[in-house]
Image: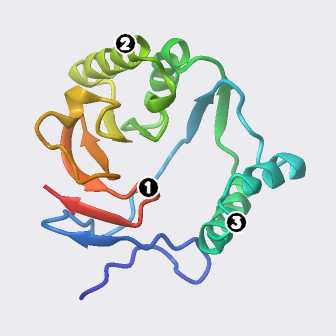
Amino acid sequence: GSQVLLGDVESEPVLECRAEGPVPFPDRRPVIAWRGGVDLNPLDVTDDDAARWLETLVWPEHEDRRARLRAATALARADPPHLVRGDLLEVLPGLVEQAAAHGLVVVQHSAVVAYLDDLDRARFASMMGDLVASGACHWLSNEGPQVLPGVTGDAAPPSGSFVLGVDGRAVAHTHGHGRSITWL
């Protein structure tokens, strides 16, 4: 099949993904003006011990993921994102507002909301729906099919797959580590 390459494959981490269906490939990478994140216990990639700890979380047989993590860590160390310690339900709206000063805001998460209980998942989905409806941001979610049922809707994926949502609507089924995407 054909390949779509964006960026400098010699100096940047390469994310390989098998694609099926009418995936709307961009013709260039987006310009990212500001990066921020929220976590109850954010890891500082500029700290060697924290970076080593992060590497221990990659399964031993997944050397390709470990190499990609090392390359991404090097990039993040050169230009660290703005990280906030806190509960995403409390902190995220302020981060969206802060990011708006830099341009179009996109809130992206993958395998994060699964760690919230059912009530907080519903609160998060409602909060994101309100932020999208107000024009404050776009929302890219990549979670298991039971995590955000309002996003999954009738687009239940094959067993073990995630659901990629754009602004609260399912657009694709994905592999949890980004190895494949099937556009709906």
The residue sitting at the bottom extreme is 1
Residue denoted by label 1: 31
Residue denoted by label 2: 123
Amino acid type, label 2: Arg
Q: Secondary structure at mark 3?
A: loop
- Where does the C terminus fall, quadrant-wise? bottom left
Amino acid type, label 3: Pro
Image height check: is 38 above or below 145? above
Q: Residue at x 23, y 54 (%)?
A: 158
- Where does the N terminus fall, quadrant-wise? bottom left
Pointers 1 and 2 in contact (C-beta within 8 Å) = no
Lower position in the chain sequence, tag 3 or tag 2: 3
Along the line of sight, the residue nearer the viewer: 6 or 99 = 6
Q: Position of residue 148 (x, y in %)?
A: 30, 29
* Image disc number at residue 60: 3
**Which of labels 1 and 2 is toward the front?**
2
Q: Position of residue 3 (x, y in %)?
A: 31, 83
Q: Residue at x 38, y 79 (%)?
A: 5
Amino acid type, label 1: Val
Q: Residue at x 18, y 59 (%)?
A: 183
Q: Quadrant of residue 10?
A: bottom right
Is 56 placed left or right of 25 in the picture? right
* Image disc number at residue 92: none
- Assess disc 2: are there few (<14), some (14-19) or many (≥20) residues with their C-alpha within 10 Å of its C-alpha: some
**Which of labels 3 and 2 is toward the front?**
3
Q: Secondary structure at mark 2?
A: helix
